Image (cartoon, helix red, strand yellow):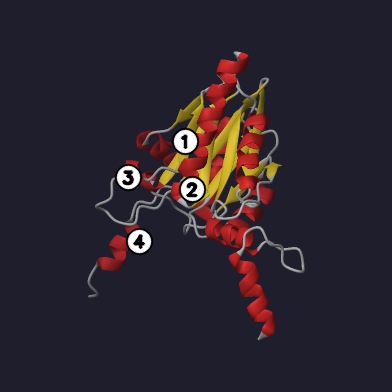
Amino acid sequence: MQGQQQQQAYDRGITIFSPDGRLYQVEYAREAVKRGTASIGVRTNDGVVLAVDKRVPSPLLEDSSVEKIHKADDHVGIASAGHVADARQLIDFARRQTQVNQLRYGEPIGVETLTKEVTDHIQQYTQVGGARPFGVALIVGGIQNGEPRLFETDPSGTPYEWKALAVGSDRGELQTFLEENYDPEADLDGGIRLALDALASVNEGSLLPNEVGLATIDVETESFEQFDQDRIQSHLEENDLLDTGEDEADDDEPAE
């Protein structure tokens, strides 16, 4: 009983370590990330792929209002998992940092530098009383000095660099799929195929174009490009991942 009371006390304070060196509020923020739909990043020789599961909870909801992929600068894209409002705050911060760097130094900000600016901002919310941590994880992908770079931000304020990663729900299964199927020699189309295959692996093997977000940052052009639904549908058809709804139609047929 006493141990439970002590844990509750540590729960209330973001700036207080528990006796075993844990910040419970940061751990709870990570749990909030797990409740968000999945986002995937894949680094290839030709660029970076960002793919997200943006399930639409109601047919009355406009698909375009579900935003999980954002352009931070011409050469940087960000995908999120977790609390959408928290993600927007961090993305707005990242966009300001890109503009500050451009005005101050006359050149685009490095992807690693931008990621560390964001994680420094996140870390402040684990050290100052009266505020909670950000309940979101970001995947930051872009081109730096002609090389593709891919980073993750954690609610603790720690940046990690990856070749391929998943954040959000089903992270364990998605990460295992990426580890087993990642090809370091793949081109951009191969990266798109891997990201979509991974999403489909936790969605009964098929996907709807309006419930998937897809973007790339190409090494050659160093530009962020977000795909529309027609293009996403084309990629799903090419890889036999398009949900045609035939199974549901069969289930709806009356029994003879």
Q: x%, y% of residue 63?
A: 32, 45
Label 1 or label 2, whichever comes before in sequence order: 1
**Tag 2 secondary structure:** helix
Q: Residue at x 51, y 30 (%)?
A: 95
Which residue reaches farthest front? 129
- Which mark is in front, 3 or 2? 2
Pointer 3 local density, CA inside 10 Å: few below 14, some 14–19, many at least 20? some
Label 4 or label 2, whichever comes before in sequence order: 2
Q: Quadrant of the N terminus?
A: bottom right
Amino acid residing under circle 3: Asp
- Residue 98's image quarter? top right
Question: How far apart are the two marked residues, 1 and 3, measured between alpha carbons?
Answer: 15 Å
Q: x%, y% of residue 145?
A: 68, 20
Q: Are marks 3 and 2 in contact (CB under 8 Å)?
A: no
Residue 247 is marked as: 4
- Residue 12's image quarter? bottom right
Q: Which residue is mark 2?
A: 86
| In this picture, residue 54 sits left or right of residue 48 | left
Question: How far apart are the two marked residues, 4 and 2, measured between alpha carbons?
Answer: 37 Å
Q: Quadrant of the C terminus?
A: bottom left
Label 3 or label 2, whichever comes before in sequence order: 3
Amino acid residing under circle 4: Asp
Pointer 1 local density, CA inside 10 Å: few below 14, some 14–19, many at least 20? many
Q: Which residue is mark 1?
A: 70
Label 1 or label 3, whichever comes before in sequence order: 3
- Which mark is in front, 4 or 2? 2
Question: How far apart are the two marked residues, 3 and 4, measured between alpha carbons?
Answer: 23 Å
Residue 63 is marked as: 3
Residue 112 is marked as: none
